[in-house]
Image (tube, rainbow, N blue to C red):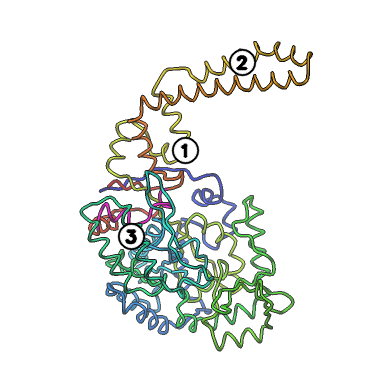
Amino acid sequence: METKEIHLNPPAGFYRDYLNQRTELSELFDYTYKSTDWLKKRADELVKRTNSGINREDLVTHLLKTHSDLEYPDAAIENIKKLQKEEAVVIVGGQQAGLLTGPLFTLYKALTVVLSAKQQEKELKIPVVPVFWIAGEDHDFEEIRFVFKEKDGKWRKHPIVDEDVQCSASEKALPKEELFKWLEGVFESLPETDYTCELIEWIQQTATTCHTYTDFFMKLMNHFFKEEGLVFVDAHHPDLRRLETGFFKELIEKMDSLQKNQQVGLSEFVEKGYQAPIVTDEENAHLFLSVDQKRVRLDYEDGHFICRNDDQSFSKEELLSILEAEPERFSNNVVTRPLMQEWVLPVLAFIPGPGELAYWGTLKPVFNLFDWKMPPLIPRIQMTIVPRAVQKWVERVDYSYETLLGEESEQLKQEWIKAQHSFPIEKVVEEVKENVQNVHAPLRELARDMDPTLHAMSEKNATFLMDQIQFLESRLHRHIEETHKHAIGQFEEAIFWLKPLGSPQERIIHPIILLNIVGQSGLKQILNQPIAVNGEHKLLFL
């Protein structure tokens, strides 16, 4: 097992410009990516901060409690206790609580958090704790209810049967009977390896101990990173919500300015020439309230908070009273979640994916509203796993991974097929079509002069001839494909793994597929690979 870096240029846009440190983007951030001592400056700023947020001891007590019933708590608890030190900071990244942890990029995000924390603790010589922020309040069930699995040589969505009741993942109970049926569907798609039986037994056992989607997610992630001390924050844990009451109050009281600053940040982003990464109405309060066990968006207009698609409304004073009595009913959206994260944790840096990076580029004014600087943003690792059979094929046909991963898959396939033969099919077909059209034209003209009905018939006749030529062309191509069927199959198998469904592998394949190939020992080897957090794409050869 080894890793290799390749330069895979992202599509033109904000993410590429950020990696390339485009000068104009510095106006959107308080810390410039990879600038001299940018993380040292951030650590110093945190020490001087007066609006420091949650009490450290309260935070530590809460985290120790939530980690006590995990199967492998020791390394995480050791890191949690580091937060008692005044100079301790965190590297944080987060994700929704997807089934089986969701796509591979969730694993890569956590890996980036762990590696960055180790690196910065060494360089800054202060405690740096890796934290994974589980967006447990998220109620977008359609995004977390499925994984892709292989079926009949294709990647297909495999959703769990469960009702979408618009409540948060931290409150949504796992339907155990349906979960085990769903897991059977996942397991039957896995090729049997030396690790399959043990893997199935572990996941089934873990599932029996879980009550919610967030619970299941956290226990799997804890297992993956059991020796790395990754600390988990369930953003919608009721005890944490009670500790966050003070900042929810501040958000409500400053709502007029929050709305204005958010729109300013969005406008500044768009003025740089980029498409708006998040579209928010001016009346959006960037808060949610649980109403009848459903997570409902709040709007704010004319001094009142209004439940979206509901007739309930509250004055600031009324909403503050609800907050005081039931803080667990409140939650954040993509704008206020980073602010709450900043209030709860001493954030040295945040680890975003490409999409997150763009919407964070709109948030500087809302951070500044609370007299904070927006934290440094370190893009997460992007990686492609290369199975051994695929590696051998790529080496044999002398393709570059940059080409295979960077270009459109079907176009690559057609170009490759053309290179396998010397028959000028397209050229001859075009010549024949042109000749037939020319030869047939006098017949159509004669029919037009004689009778409109005959002219229509002649046009249909011409179309029929073109269709027949098209049919013959497809048969010629099919003959080529059948002649090179084995080689084409190898090409398609490579693309099946490297760029499934034409997308980055990390967005389609989930971690259990990887563990079925490498096992727990293999995962440990991956975590111990010398992987640099530097914005370059990684290849992992199994």
Measuring from the top left, give residue 385's x and y in whole percent: 34, 48
Horizontal side of 359 relative to 501 (left or right) equals right
Three-letter residue code for mark 2: Glu
Q: If you read the primary sequence from the N terminus, does the residue marked by circle 2 or circle 1 appear first?
A: 1
Callout 1: helix, strand or loop?
loop
The CA span between labels 2 and 3 is 57 Å
Can you see residue 349? no
Tell me the residue at 35%/80% (across/down): 64
The percent position of residue 533, horizontal first and vertical second, equals 39, 55
CB under 8 Å between callouts 2 and 3? no
Q: Give me the disc on residue 285.
A: none
Residue 85 position by quadrant: bottom left
Q: Which residues are magenta?
A: 505-519
Please determine whether, in this image, residue 535 is positioned above or below residue 177.
Answer: above
Residue drawn 73% across and 18% down?
454
- Left or right: residue 364 compared with residue 155: right
Asked whether residue 112 is drawn in magenta, I would say no
* Residue ID for mark 2: 434
For marks 3 and 1 on the same chain, the one whose residue lies earlier in the sequence: 3
**Residue type of the residue flagged with mark 1:** Glu
Sort mark 1 into few (<14), some (14-19) or many (20+) by Cα contacts within 10 Å: few
Q: Nearer the viewer, mark 3 or mark 1?
A: 3
Q: Which residue is mark 3?
A: 184
Q: What residue is shown with label 1? A: 407
Q: Secondary structure at mark 3?
A: helix
